[in-house]
Image: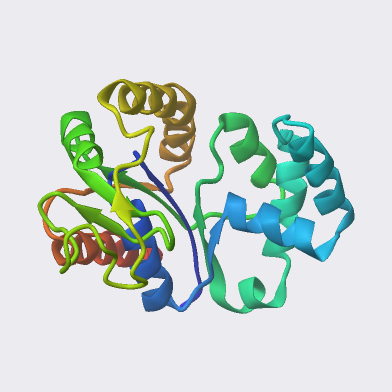
Amino acid sequence: MTARLLIFGRQGAGKGTQSERLSAHYETPHISTGDMLRAAVAAGTPLGIEAKAVMDGGGLVSDEIILGVVEERLAEADVKANGFLLDGFPRTVVQAEGMAKFATIDVAIDLVVPEEIVLERISSRRVCAKCGAIYSVAAPPSTEWVCDKCGGEVQQRADDTPESIAKRLAAYTSETQPTIDFYAASGSLVRVDGLGSPDEVFARLLSAIDARLSN
């Protein structure tokens, strides 16, 4: 069954972990905006060249460029054969409306975790400075603050202060909630409780997605 999915979730909701598992389960490419832009820049596509010029100048890549990059990526063979899982896109209603012109979404997932839990998770998060592996105060690496995967230094991110986290969460709500509402209105949204163990959350996700795909 080909699945065309997108996933929303606050930072700290576990979206990255669950996206990897969903991608493997449905055998569909896990696609993020950042990955798409980097690939377009590396490939030297016309849109990639345009995006690079904007980014090199310190500007924000326009919706028009991002939508063009997304459209190109979703036209590639692996997506046509296996569907996709979009992570981090669309962020705005304008982007959602633009994407609707060239892509159909089977299921839009909102991974729901209360803000106070997310704040607690991010505040205790620790990240490997070398490979990006994620740990926490409650689940540290085997050797104190030395990454189990690569031996790099595990530390708290400089922007993981309560003040910075609160600002990011507020920005997510103001920017992304209208987009979530857009998919709710279209009938493609499922809301999934993100609390519990990764296995428990994954089981809920599969149940919700499969129920929608079978309709």
- Tell me the residue at 37%/56% (across/down): 16
In this view, the residue in front, 196 or 52, is 52
- Which residue is at a point 54% across and 65% down the rendered structure image? 84
For residue 169, what is the image quadrant?
top left
Instruction: Pick whichever, 128 or 88, lies toward us.
Output: 128
Residue visible at 32% across and 61% down in the picture: 18
Left or right: where 88 falls relative to 111: right
Above/below status of 134 relative to 92: below
Q: Is residue 183 left or right of residue 164?
A: right
Residue at image position (79%, 44%) is: 51
> Residue 163 is drawn in which quadrant?
top left
- Total tally of numbered discs in the picture: 0
Horizontally, residue 214 falls left or right of residue 43, namely: left
Task: Report x, y in % for residue 113.
Answer: 22, 40
Q: State the quadrant of the C terminus.
A: bottom left
- Spot occupied by residue 63 in the image (x, y as percentages of width and height): 71, 35
Viewer-proximal residue among 22 and 33: 33
Render colour scheme: rainbow
Residue 147, position as x, y percentages in the image: 29, 65
Is 9 rendered above or below residue 115? below
Q: Residue 34 at what x, y percent from top left?
A: 60, 51
| Residue 14 in the image: above or below residue 118 | below
Rendered position, 84 above or below 193? below
